Amino acid sequence: MRKQIRGLLLCAVVLAGCGGKAAKPVEPVTPEATPTAAVEATPSPTREATPEVTPEVPLRPTSSLTSEATPTVAPTAAPTATPTVAPTVAPTVAPTATPTAAPTVAPTATPTVAPTAAPTAAPTATPVVHETAPGTNIVHKVSEAAPWIVIDAGHQSKADSEREPVGPGAAETKAKVSSGTQGKWTGVSEYALNLEISLRLRDALLLEGYNVIMIRETNEVNISNAERATIANEAQADVFIRIHADGSDNPAAQGMMTICPTPKNVYCKEIYEESRRLSDCVLRQMVAKTGAKSRKVWETDTMSGINWCQVPVTIVEMGFMSNKEEDYLLQDAQYQEKIVQGILEGIQEYLGR
């Protein structure tokens, strides 16, 4: 009985000692220091007092503390995340972006600038270099080397019935200039149509790099046919284009033609071959562009505006304003552009450009 009482007292003492030791690990202030103190302090009294009690009482708080303190996950995860992300992103993005941008921009910019410089000819040609009278003999110069094209928009708003020789030294005379025909259905005057086409042709030639002289750029002028030819002669034009439209008492008459001197012209037979070749080229290209009927090249020595010429010349008859279909077509912007493109390509064919 005494032995039992003594044993109970010893157990009570051990339990009291263990209770004091177990209170320390509960402090969560320093998680790293707590498990160390628990492991080192707990075995000492347990082993001296009773080896039998040690596995049940003191070891459970120790193992529980160890399992909470041991998984030091934070230090393990930090070093793993840092090296993985940083090196992967930096080398991949930097080298890819730099080479891609450089080759794409450089080649695109170079070809875009080159064609833009060509149309700059238009502003250079815009200033009036010379006018013999207001709105006449307007010079549009693109470059010294470019061919010179003289455009005569036939007729004018008011006819001049005063007479002039039909050619140099001729006894025969004709009215200096007439106002032309008129659209039977549209009511548009030929002189207005001629100027509209001539202005379109001027712009097309300037864009192609030609020097251009306009006999007139307004309808309110007074220039005789001999004076128009003289302007082209003085400019030493490579090509003299005279823009006209036809009229007839026969409403069925239709089609295009060009006009040049005959080989026996007493005033300008020396320009016959070049004028004929120019007339052929222009007519061929106009018919090809518009699909109009070709009325061939008319060779004649009755035109004052041809007889006074010393440079290759052709008169363009674009169609009949007395024909209903062609009268309306000649007022159509798209059809006008086809005529202009035909004349332009005829000039280029003639000049070999």
Image (tube, grey):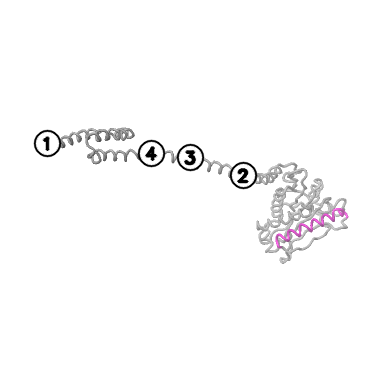
- Front-most of residues 5 and 71: 5
Majority SS type along the magenta span: helix
* Residue 181, image quadrant: bottom right
- x, y percentage for residue 148? 77, 47
Give the residue at mark 4: 74
Mark 1 lies on a secondary structure that is: helix
Q: Mark 4 or 3, which is nearer the eye?
A: 4
Residue named by callout 2:
103
Q: For the magenta stretch, what is the residue range?
A: 266-291
* Tag 3 secondary structure: helix
Q: In the rendered structure, which amino acid carries the disc numbered 1?
A: Arg
Q: Would residue 220 be found to the left or right of residue 41 on screen?
A: right
Distance of label 3 from label 1 (alpha carbons): 74 Å
Counting from the top left corner in percent of width and height, residue 163 is at 81, 52
Q: Residues within 10 Å of mark 4 (few under 14, many from 20)?
A: few
For badge 2, the amino acid type reads: Pro
Q: Which residue is mark 1?
A: 2
- In this picture, is 318 found above or below 129? below
Determine the CA span between mark 2 and mark 4.
46 Å
Q: Earlier in the sequence, mark 2 or mark 4?
A: 4
